[in-house]
């Protein structure tokens, strides 16, 4: 049974008011709210368990280590990784992508190619540009059509023996487009030896993830977009690949032996977890996975798809409102503008006065905005606790903004 009021009751923040109105939180693609079960784990960690991990033989250190490793195994299950040591704790998708692009430096030469897409978040663009600067490699970008759909015939033309990395997101944060990554992975494998990187920041909160079935080499996501605290994230990498590649950060915890004659590195996952990790946050990420499992992935997806369907239908009843991106290929996000009426931030400010939180602007995806020749969009994005009544309020709010701005 899916009981929306019961789910909402687990998120205390949803009871608060904003500008004298009940909060309507529709900015989940930027960060989700956290259920009380996750907050309680954070609190319990600092009140009962706080100690550094892996280093001490004292009881608290051992308990903290056990809890963090238990969380790692929950996440392993969550993405169906073959081994728990393929699950690396990071502070988010951005760190994961920077880590991957850095450790691949030695694998690329001048004129090699990295393929990304027009739909990428800046954090799946800039690290690859930096890698190109270091190595002389070139970036190739899969274009999109007017509906925001990737043009895979261009992708086919790009694939060659020069292709060393293919890095795309599973779901676009700006438009909510679900990309055909299964197809992209299959075509890459068939034609190249390239490393395949999937940015799952917007898919992990909504989909069942199976990295073995996907057969990607890397999969990265952020905890804070899937009900966990900020400063948490995961990098999944295939065992053979992570074992063969060099470390990223050097420091404590990532060495086997350290001397001035040379240092040997720890095995996985510690080789990629230098320094003191966010122990409490990483444990709470496991609690967020527990929360999602309790609600059920099918329930999450069905509810969010129903919200999207409802929002799209009612928003499009507003004359002059344009939604970006093919509806049949989207999840969790509706990105729109009121034609000829102010700019997206004007709409966002009026909605905020009504207690409605949306994101406006370019959503860290300036190339998409350039493609559509716009400065930004209004983006409403959904989580499992959103309701149809909240979408009614959004639609009313957008109508009001249109009246005020025209
Ligand atoms: C949010 C997001 C990122 C960056 O995630 P951080 O949590 O800010 O590191 C990268 N890619 C996509 C698709 C995103 O939505």
Image (cartoon, rainbow, N blue to C red):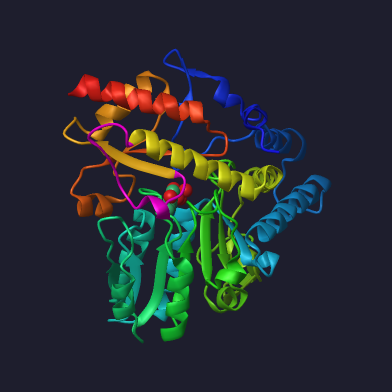
Q: Nearer the viewer, residue 402 or 358?
A: 402
Q: Does the stretch in magenta take in 324? A: yes
Residue at 25% x, 56% y: name it.
146
Please identify the dominant SS of the magenta region.
loop
Residue at 21% x, 33% y: name it.
343
In this view of the protein, can residue 192 be seen by the observer? no
Q: Nearer the viewer, residue 131 or 316?
A: 316
On screen, residue 144 versus residue 38, left or right, reads left
Q: Nearer the viewer, residue 146 or 204?
A: 146
Identify the image quadrant of residue 380. top left
Q: How many marks?
A: 0
Screen quadrant of the N terminus: top right
The vertical placement of 76 against 15, above or below, is below
Residues in magenta? 316-332
Screen quadrant of the C terminus: top left
The vertical placement of 109 against 201, above or below, is below
On screen, residue 181 versus residue 244, left or right, reads left
Residue at 45% x, 72% y: name it.
183
Residue 264: percent from left, percent from top = 61, 75
Q: Does the stretch in magenta take in 110? A: no
Residue 349: percent from left, percent from top = 31, 25
Residue 307: percent from left, percent from top = 49, 38
The vertical placement of 79 against 337, above or below, is below
Residue furthest to the top: 20
Identify the image quadrant of residue 403. top left
Q: Nearer the viewer, residue 236 or 338?
A: 338
Identify the image quadrant of residue 34. top right
């Amino acid at each position: 049974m899916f009981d929306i009021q019961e789910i909402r009751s687990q998120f205390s923040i949803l009871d608060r008011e904003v500008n004298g109105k009940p909060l309507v939180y529709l900015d989940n693609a930027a960060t989700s709210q956290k259920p009380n079960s996750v907050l309680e784990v954070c609190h319990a960690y600092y009140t009962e368990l706080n100690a550094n991990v892996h280093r001490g033989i004292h009881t608290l250190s051992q308990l903290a280590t056990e809890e963090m490793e238990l969380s790692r195994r929950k996440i392993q299950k969550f993405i169906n990784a073959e081994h728990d040591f393929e699950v690396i704790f990071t502070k988010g998708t951005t760190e994961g992508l920077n880590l991957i692009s850095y450790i691949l430096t030695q694998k690329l030469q001048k004129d090699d190619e990295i393929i990304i897409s027009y739909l990428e978040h800046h954090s799946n663009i800039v690290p690859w540009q930096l890698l190109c600067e270091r190595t002389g490699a070139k970036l190739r970008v899969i274009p999109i059509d007017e509906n925001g759909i990737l043009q895979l015939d261009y992708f086919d033309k790009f694939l060659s023996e020069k292709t060393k990395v293919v890095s795309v997101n599973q779901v676009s944060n700006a438009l909510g487009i679900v990309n055909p990554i299964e197809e992209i992975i299959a075509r890459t494998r068939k034609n190249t030896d390239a490393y395949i990187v999937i940015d799952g920041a917007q898919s992990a909160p909504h989909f069942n993830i199976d990295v073995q079935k996907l057969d990607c080499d890397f999969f990265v996501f952020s905890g804070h977009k899937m009900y966990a605290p900020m400063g948490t994230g995961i990098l999944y990498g295939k065992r053979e690949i992570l074992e063969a590649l060099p470390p990223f950060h050097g420091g404590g915890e990532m060495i086997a032996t350290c001397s001035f004659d040379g240092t040997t590195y720890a095995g996985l996952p510690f080789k990629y977890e230098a320094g003191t990790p966010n122990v409490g946050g990483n444990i709470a990420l496991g609690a967020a996975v527990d929360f999602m499992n309790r609600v059920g992935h099918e329930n999450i997806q069905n509810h969010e798809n129903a919200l999207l369907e409802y929002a799209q239908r009612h928003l499009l009843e507003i004359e002059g409102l344009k939604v970006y991106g093919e509806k049949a290929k989207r999840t969790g996000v509706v990105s729109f503008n009121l034609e000829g009426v102010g700019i997206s931030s004007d709409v966002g400010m009026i909605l905020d006065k009504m207690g409605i939180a949306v994101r406006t602007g370019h959503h860290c995806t300036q190339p998409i905005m350039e493609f559509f020749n716009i400065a930004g969009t209004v983006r409403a994005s959904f989580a499992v606790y959103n309701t149809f009544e909240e979408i009614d309020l959004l639609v009313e709010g957008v109508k009001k903004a249109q009246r005020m701005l025209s």
